[in-house]
Image: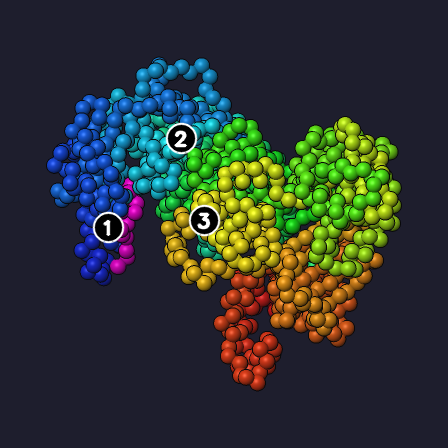
Amino acid sequence: MRAVFNAITELEYICLVTPHITDIEPALKDTFEPLQSLTDPGPRCLALICHRRQHCPRLHIRPAREVDHDDIMHIFEQHAKFFDQPYVLAELIDAQNEDNHSAVCEIDGVTVGFISVTADVDLKKLRDGFELSDFNGLYKPQQTELDEPGEADEEPRRTQTSTSQQGTHSAGEEFSQKPNAFCIQLFIMDKKYEMRSVDFIPYVFKLFPHRDFCVFTVPSLSAECPLLQSFLRVPPRANSSLVHELYVSHRVGLRPVGVRPAVSADRPAVSALVQGLTLSESLLKDLDCFYESRGDPDGLQLQAFVAQVDVEVVGIVIIRDEQDIEFIRAHFNIENFIYFSHHRYEEHALIRHFVLKPSFQHFTKHLFKDVLRLSHRSCLYHRLYPPPHSQQNSCVHHLDGVLNCAVPIRPRRQIIYPLEELGINAPSRRITEEQAPFALCLISRKLTLEPKVTINARIVVVGASDTGLSFLEVLCLCPHLRFNNLTLISTHGFPGDYNHEDVGFLSTSHAYSSRDLAQLPLHSCVCVVTDKMVGINRKSKHVLVSGGEKVLYDHLILCTGLQYQVPCPIGVDLNQPVSNGELQNQAARRRYTGPVPSNLFTLNDLHDCVAARRWLCANFVDLEDHAVVYGNNIDVYTTVETLLSLGVRGSRIHVVLPPPEPDVCCFSDPAVEKAVATATEKAGVQVHSNCLLAQMNNGENPDPLTSVSFATDAEPLLLQCGVFINLSNKGVDCDAFKSISGSFLVFDGRLVINSSFLTSDSDICGAGPVTKFSRCYYSDEWSHASFNSKEVGQELAAMMLLLFDPTQEPVDELPSDLDHLVPLYKQAMIQGGKLPGGFNYLHFTKPAASNPTDPPVEHLEDRGIVTGRVETGDYFCLHLDCFELVETITCFSLKPLPVSNYLSLYGKHQQLLGQMLSRYHQSLIHDLYSFFRQSWCLAVYHDRFSDFELELQPITSQKLTDDESSAMTEDGFDEVESRAALRSGAVKYLSYNENLLPMFACSGQL
């Protein structure tokens, strides 16, 4: 019981009700005492109660005395903190007056904690560094009211994303210059009694009866102590240079808060409470619907509850029946946190609106606990819609209050069903019908008693690459951790603000679509700085961006990736004979520093593609000028297809291919490469090979660009140019290079890191193609560019979590022999896009070294499966490795591809895929597209199939005799028990996932 009372500080009593009136265990009799019955005869049960005072009493608080000095220093030693100025402690105790107080808490006469508070607070410094508009700047209002000052939302943090957090400032409210806050100077607590540190709060407020706020500043890297659970964290301003976090508590937060169903008489108080908040009209409309019919216009039940202090309404929660629970179950992993079968459908509800005054934000978890109890619900869900659908958001103030209580739910990978072929065997339309994408958070009864670990460390990610986004995804989806200071520095903002599917131009890694990003809580958990890194100050630990702002960091993550650079003309006289080999080496060392022509587009991200598309539609498509596409990679051909789809005739498009880099080709499959060349030629596109840009506008003013000259192995090439699209010279961005080298981080063609992602600065990590491993590993052929960028980001996040996650044990230092091994990752390298001729292209394969020293291993013909032809647009090529696992897939089709289905095939054994290899050799498979559309494949595409495979491993890993084959053949399972276990496991897997796999008949359906 002591552990329970310690964990839940607000708990006063524990009741035990049992029908066993006489049969009570002796241990329970010693812990609980019976309650007297108020009726005669009493109920046929036994009611017992346990009091806090018997197991974990509240601590006794008294003023500190000089004789307490040694006891307090002993507590510092327990915390392994070296207090290098012990005389300061003596001065704090000795200097007590009406503005300075010190106190100790004790139990059984033993000092277990110390606190020092003062009325001397630098309010100007705090106002300059933090958003204090909710607290009147910590000054007293000129007309003091019973409660704390009126509501006003903070200004947006840079480009902070959640509209539900933003409101308008209260107008016409004036404040005096009389301070209304005192601060905690020093606080220490014995670890055994940390959860009772909240006993200090009522005491210190009594010391300053005329001040309403208690403030506490803590270093951003320090762990959040239990005392701060009764405080509200104040977000810093965008330009804040303070290295501390600010926490605020209002004295009214000490009052007991009651929760009850809303009544019509609460309408004026609620209206005043939400005045000035975004979407407040939506809240009041739903509240009126609740008063009138207890339901919304769609007929769904509404319930409204208010939080009340004395007679004042300080908060409101409106919930609604969750009608889409089957959709949520199918699209989000809610079963990571609840047993779905243990909850009735009517026990799931959606948080429509939530508003609570800042002074009571620490009560949010208890508010939801009471809402669950009064509404007879077990689960509450909150949806977070991205900016394009923000009108569907709820009125939530503050969103941080909800996120601190709720757990983020990871979205599930979806099966792409052949609905027409499945017919009545397809999943319910409630599951397959698309909705506007949203991120999801969950609050359940159990989760209201599980505290989160708050991480205030300032983690700054530079670059919205696949690596950076996957790193942030892992941190944001940690259910028991709450990262308050995640920042993304991106030149063009958050990539999820663009529709990935409709832009075109660039190929895709299929890591994140716009829908994928919308289903992640990045908008709500990450502060986005739309700017470009131009400098790193390692001493002051800040990143300087092009707008002049300094972004402070404790941990800096550099994952800027590689970008196409503006081509620099070699500037040679084309009348003089010069070989392309000499010019190529010269061009690689040159950087363009002149003005960039307005009609020259270097495409690196979605923002660049959207800008180019708009310009082309407005200034080029309807004219007769020519377009020059310069580069030698797959992006060149996806750009050509985009131009053709915009209505540009092929004869107006010139593809100029510079000399290819060694061991680099656009397409790994020669058949696909030939088909693309044929389709490009058929469209009338002119292709020029082995060309280097020599001059723009004949060396004159390049803006606007009207002609370009290229050096070739034969005659120079001169082209008229209405638009120049550059997809060449991929490398480290110039500003990123200057920032890295200017901060004296080791740079050797790429940012140098070790096997743990660390640079030469332990507070700066690097990941992704912008990095390379140190030469001490003697593995120059391997780098992060050789691996799946999303997986690299996930591994980086796993390494970072070791610093913050108390549930993980830190890894000891690696042995010296293992420390010189580079890490290798397993996920597939993926590439896709739409190519000339309207062909949909998908290629994925295992990671491979960039410049392998060993001779390449060719695919064995008997382990390759090819159906269809590139000419007819039904080409499908699949290769197996030596263990008969799917290693490579290439699709070249005129029809849309179910990409997520095919990606799930990677690493699967061919026997799991319907004895694919033997059936192919028996000429039973003529079309792999049709083969993988069969309903039996859908179980393999399921996102939990990998877990099912792991469950079966103990069965399938039985020892085989030396004469038996190691392959998984039927002869390998002679035992009846093994066969029965496999069947039972398969039936359980299909039965549990019946909502997504209804095409399989389970037990009892036949």
Mark 3 / mark 2, whichever is N-terminal: 2
| Tag nearer the camera, 1 or 2 | 2
At 67% from the left and 65% from the top, the residue drawn is 856
Q: What quarter of the picture does the C terminus occupy?
A: bottom right
Residue name at image x 74 percent, y 39 percent: 570
Color scheme of the displayed model = rainbow
* Segment colored magenta: 1-20
Q: Amino acid at mark 1?
A: Arg
Q: Position of residue 230 (x, y in %)?
A: 32, 36
Q: Residue at x 48, y 56 (%)?
A: 341
The local secondary structure at tag 2 comes to loop
Residue 800: give its label: 3
* Residue that carries the numbered disc 2 in the rendered image: 242
**Disc 1 or 3, which lies upstream in sequence?**
1
Q: Decide: is 730 above or below 595.
A: below
**Kind of residue at badge 2:** Leu
Residue 216 x, y percent position in the rendering: 32, 32
